[in-house]
Amino acid sequence: MGAYIGRRLLATLVVMAIVGLIVFLLLHLAPGSPAAIIAGDNATPAQIALINRQLGLDRPLPVQFGLWAWDVLRGRFGTSIFSGVPVMELVLQRIPATVSLSLVTIVFAATVAVTGGVLAAWRVGGVLDRTLMAIAALGFSVPVFVVGYLLIYLFAIRLRWLPVQGYVPISAGLWPWLSHLLLPALALGLAYLALISRITRAAVLEVLAEDYIRTARAKGATSMSQLFHHALRNAGVPIATVIGIGIALLISGVVLTETVFNIPGIGRLTVDAITNRDYPIIQGVMVIFSGAYVVINLMVDLSYTLIDPRIRR
Amino acid sequence: MQTSRRTVLRTALGGVLGLPAIGSARAATPTVLRAVMQGDLRSFDPIWTTANISAYYGAMVYDTLFAIDDTYKPQPQMVGKWGLSDDKKTYTFQLRDGLAWQDNTPVTAADCVASIRRWAVRNAGGQAIMARAQDLSAKDDKTIVLTLKEPFGLVITALSTCTTPICFMMPKKDAETDPFQQVSGRIGSGPFTFNQTLTQPGSRYVFDKWDKYAPRSEPASSLAGGKVVKLDQVMWENITDQQTASAALSAGEIDFYELPPLDLVPQLASNPNIKLKIMNPTGNVGELRMNTLHPPFDNVKARQAMLYLLDQKAILNATFGDPKYYHPSPSIFGYETPMSNDANTGWFTEAPNPAKAKQLFAEAGYKGEKVIVLQATDFAFMNNSAQLVAGWLQGIGVNAELAAMNWGEVITRRASMKPDDQGGWDIFITYGGGFDFSDPIMLIALAANGTKGWFGWPENADYEKLRTQWAEAGTVAEQQVIAKKMQAVAWDFVPMAMLGSWTQPAAMRTNVDGFLTNPDVVPFWNVTKT
């Protein structure tokens, strides 16, 4: 097991290096330059060239990449071209908001979706099943910003139950923190709810047809015991996989949600940096994201051994 | 004092849930104004960047020697007394009493000299001053002396400009920073201090009232007069989604929204708790730049054809919809600015006249070569206008081709002087602050000095002579006479085409009052919230 984890962590470094190279090339080969943005609308070409020189953007690309990669290897992700704040400091400032949103979203989506998926499988073809699957179809079909605006209109403007936007750290209190995350988590979580509930339903349906479920029923196990003790446990691997994928996908999903609900997270940081061509931030965030993505996948793989002891062998 | 279990439970629950302790004494609530401004405050150096939001920051934290009032006249601000020698070559500025940096050290003339020098590298007006300067120095702690080689009528105008970069005064150690590098200091002598503890870059910027600021005794007027702060704190919330910002204003989560999109303005106006105000009466001015280095626009007839082709009203209507907020205007000096006039505009008032435009393209020797129109898709005005212009050109048989890209790419590509087949361009559309168009020295787009000048690179010696005369004119009235002559020449050689002017109202809660107007800055002094 130790060797397996070691190999996977080593692969993480390789993935991060490849992502770093691709992001660097994409950024620097794409048109547009931070120097032109800094220089302003009235700048002459000579002024833009001067700023390019001062930012080191006039050097050959391999030299720029080498310098950046060497800094990253030493744990230095550079500083924002515009604000002058270190990238790592900016990322650390934004992580709590993104982690909070992701956590509330995945807890909401997984809890509702797994329960709903199991119950839908139990009453397959019934009203509950059809209702849940209709909600799932809606979750897949409606874009997150549409759901977001509708939720804001209903719960924040009409009913005034929840705030429109913003983020409050948990240190300010549980309710202020949660109240700012409920609407974004609901908007973002709908798609994951749809995905997880459909996979859960399919996996549980498959297990319910197995002989050992019939045996459990014959031995007098209650419906709940059949469903949640026998069926759900054996259907756990695909469900854990899809929840794991969901967590990884959240990284991209939070970008739009953070924008709509004005949550100062990593997604907003990335979008703003792309708009401004703030290369150090974009490169730093992408490398950190790729590392997080691989680590999440590794954790999902390791969770299989807890869910299904047969995989350990 | 006895503490019951109920009190303990209530306090604990309040702490966890973030609810105020019931029955506890309440401290006086500070007056905090939450505002959504035009963009993210990316740089804290208003000299290093021309971004308006950095100038807004500058106006909070720093102060200026001179500033314009609401009639656009320069007034002393940090300066108490000032004078000009009889030969009009030596300016003497004396700092008024009570000026201090926010670290409680006094503002000195040496600080101001260093600040002027740094600003002058980045500002066209400052460059014009320093090109004529023989000496700029501190005579003593409170006296600045500027000696010129020749008289120059725009010294006070340039020092008081609100066109970015504005001549903000900084402590000497910051002002000695390379003008192309950002300052690290956040200390000014303005009416607000920057609260770095509560600020979250990219999300929220916080300013506190500076109690030791000594405002002038005159009433506040735009950036001039007494900067009396009536709020305890101002927070700029960076809400990038316009729909969300509008919803936040409707719900009372923010108090002020600087630039709500015009399509959301009617909805906001219908809310009884929200009012609208034009913060920038001179608005913005759209312009179409033509590449005069290559065919077809190296020929003046092709450029004149564009003036017959363009329908300003249609262009403005496509983006701004409500005629209340836009004004067609043929003047190169913008709409209702101090220099606006109608000289030599009569000949193209019949526009749109596609037949005449077609005839002029033919007279220019146009032979079907490609005309590349850069289309900045991320700015509605530029995007919509480019599509209309390309369509109208195609309608008269011109082989116009839209090159869709984001604004960042436009500002890179427009710098190319090469022909179309080597990555060049023929037309791009942009806009600028209306007030900026009243100053042909500060606004490089109003120069016609060929490849030394701005994109499109029009060249005309007569116009340039007049531009120099304008800079040397002693009074606004003299400048207005020269401005007419400049425009008469300009509409003969057509350095660009104008696309009209528009304003955009700010929206605010009805309990907010006292906002002063200015073309390029939103001042937060004088503002009250009840």
Image (cartoon, coloured by chain):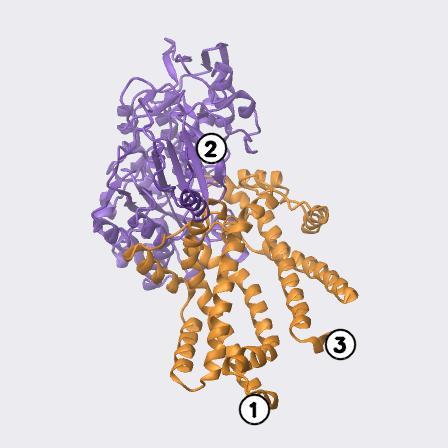
Chain colours: A orange, B purple
Residue in view at x 56 percent, y 89 percent: A209
Q: Which mark is residue A218?
A: 1
Residue under numbered circle 3: A313
Q: Which residue is mark 2?
A: B195
Taking the image as drawn, is residue B375 in sight?
Answer: no
Amino acid type of the residue that numbered disc 2 sits on in the rendered structure: Asn
**Label 1 amino acid?**
Ala
Is residue B17 something that shows in the picture? yes
Q: Nearer the viewer, mark 1 or mark 3?
A: 1
Q: Is residue A267 left or right of residue B218?
A: right
Asked if badge 1 and badge 3 are on a common chain, one would say yes
Q: Which chain is indicated by disc 2?
A: B
Question: Percent position (x, y) of residue B58?
Answer: 43, 31
Q: Quadrant of the N terminus of chain B?
A: top left
The secondary element bearing badge 2 is classed as strand
Q: Position of residue B205 (x, y in %)?
A: 45, 39
Using the numbered discs, state the Cα–Cα distance from disc 3 to disc 2 in whole angstroms.
59 Å
For the residues labelled 1 and 3, say whether their Cβ atoms are less than 8 Å apart. no
Mark 3 surroundings: few (<14), some (14-19) or many (≥20) residues within 10 A: few
Residue A261's image quarter? bottom left
